[in-house]
Amino acid sequence: RAVLPSPSRCTVTRQRQDSSSHKSTHKLQFTMKLSLATISLLASSAKAFAPAAQPLSRVSTTQIHILAGTETAAERAAANFDSKPAENADFDKMVKKAFPGAISNKELVTKAVAALDSKGFTPANTLLCTSLCADELARILEDDLNEVYGHNFNLGGLAGFPFAGNTGFGAMSAHVPDDGYCFLVHGPHVGISKEGVIGKVERSGIALVDNCCGSAIAASNYLKGITDGGANITPKLQQFSDFQQGAVQELILPFGKRLARAEDRMRELPYALYDSQEVLVTDIVNTGKGSIKKGLALLGGIQINTSPDTLDYFHPLRFDYYDENGNLVENMLPYLR
């Protein structure tokens, strides 16, 4: 005889079935939500890595360092200096007495641009490259040249040393326009105050007449401690958090006697730094000159920073032209005199 399940057992069974069905439905819903979320995430990821559509008329931002247009380099240079302070005859005489051979930035840029124009350098085909100090005052000459040739590739660090090295020069060379030129400017800088104090300069918004160049003066003081016999030995010369200053101090070591014997240490200091830098820059150029495209102009010298209401100066010590084969073919320094 068949035994019928009791009503209570049927109720329990139905509840278990209902519970199981509810769990299955919940699991299916969760799985579907997870799958939809995964699909959405993958779609978003794919969209993120897909190239962005750009209007056909948009200019690539990788081109912004090259100035297009109809203005010549000479016209751009002249327009830039229209807004600069007028030349001060008395101050000009004082600067040139302290630094024989120095010329104002206005004269430098005007003459350099004319010389480069005769070689085929234009705002549209020239990449400006600089190795100048990190100090904001070193940007003044850079800005004057930016107005002519556009944004620059920076090789420099403290005191103007080319810390970007061979790797930086190689990268820069690849950015020069096809059938174009590179104009490389390098050198340390030094201040001169309104009263003619070398190694000091007035800065906008600061009452104190400040040191310039701070990195160079710190290196000079370090070197003086060695030559005078009072320096403390430290294992932190090459610590990563200040390795550029450590390098500047090492690179100035060969000039200890020269600076010690100098009539004016602050005046001699930038020239000692320049001689050290020139060796490095020449080595970097010779190593990478195979990547020169149409030509390379190399201008080296001393930046002379002044107060905000007078023109800055530059003492050109080198202005060389290399052809597309990396051969040094002309000393253009006479063009700047």
Image (cartoon, rainbow, N blue to C red):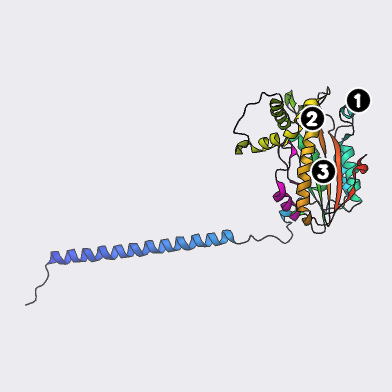
Which of label 3 and label 2 is nearer to you? 2
Q: Which residue is mark 3?
A: 145
Residue in front for this viewpoint, 251 or 325: 251
Picture coordinates of residue 136, whole percent (x, y): 73, 35
Q: Which residue is mark 1?
A: 90
In the image, 328: left or right of 5?
A: right
Can residue 285 be spotted in the picture? Answer: yes
Identity, as a three-letter code, of the amino acid under mark 1: Asp
Q: Residues within 10 Å of mark 1 (few under 14, many from 20)?
A: few
Write the residue at 74% across / 25% down. 210
Name of the residue lying farthest toward the bottom: 1
> Residue 258 shows which numbered tag?
2
The magenta span reads 153-174
Q: The N terminus appears in which quarter of the rendering?
A: bottom left
Q: Is residue 161 above or below residue 170?
A: above
User: Would you identify the image quadrant in which residue 8 lies?
Assistant: bottom left
Examine the image and state in which quarter residue 131 appears.
Answer: top right
| Residue 82 visible in image | no
Q: Amino acid at mark 2?
A: Arg
Give the CA separation, mark 3 to mark 1. 26 Å
Question: Which residue corresponds to the image point at 11% horizontal and 67% vertical from the top-left?
Answer: 6
Numbered circle sitting on residue 21:
none
Q: Is 306 above or below relative to 38?
A: above
Give coordinates of residue 159: x percent, y percent: 73, 36
Residue 72 as seen in the image, left or right of residue 251:
right
**Label 2 neighbourhood size at 10 Å, few (<14), some (14-19), many (20+)?**
few
- For the residues labelled 2 and 1, the Cα–Cα distance comes to 31 Å
- Whether residue 164 is in magenta: the answer is yes
Q: Which residue sits at x=77%, y=38%?
A: 276
Q: Mark 2 falls on what kind of element?
A: helix
| Circle 1 SS class | helix
Pinpoint residue 20: horizontal percent, then vertical percent. Answer: 26, 64
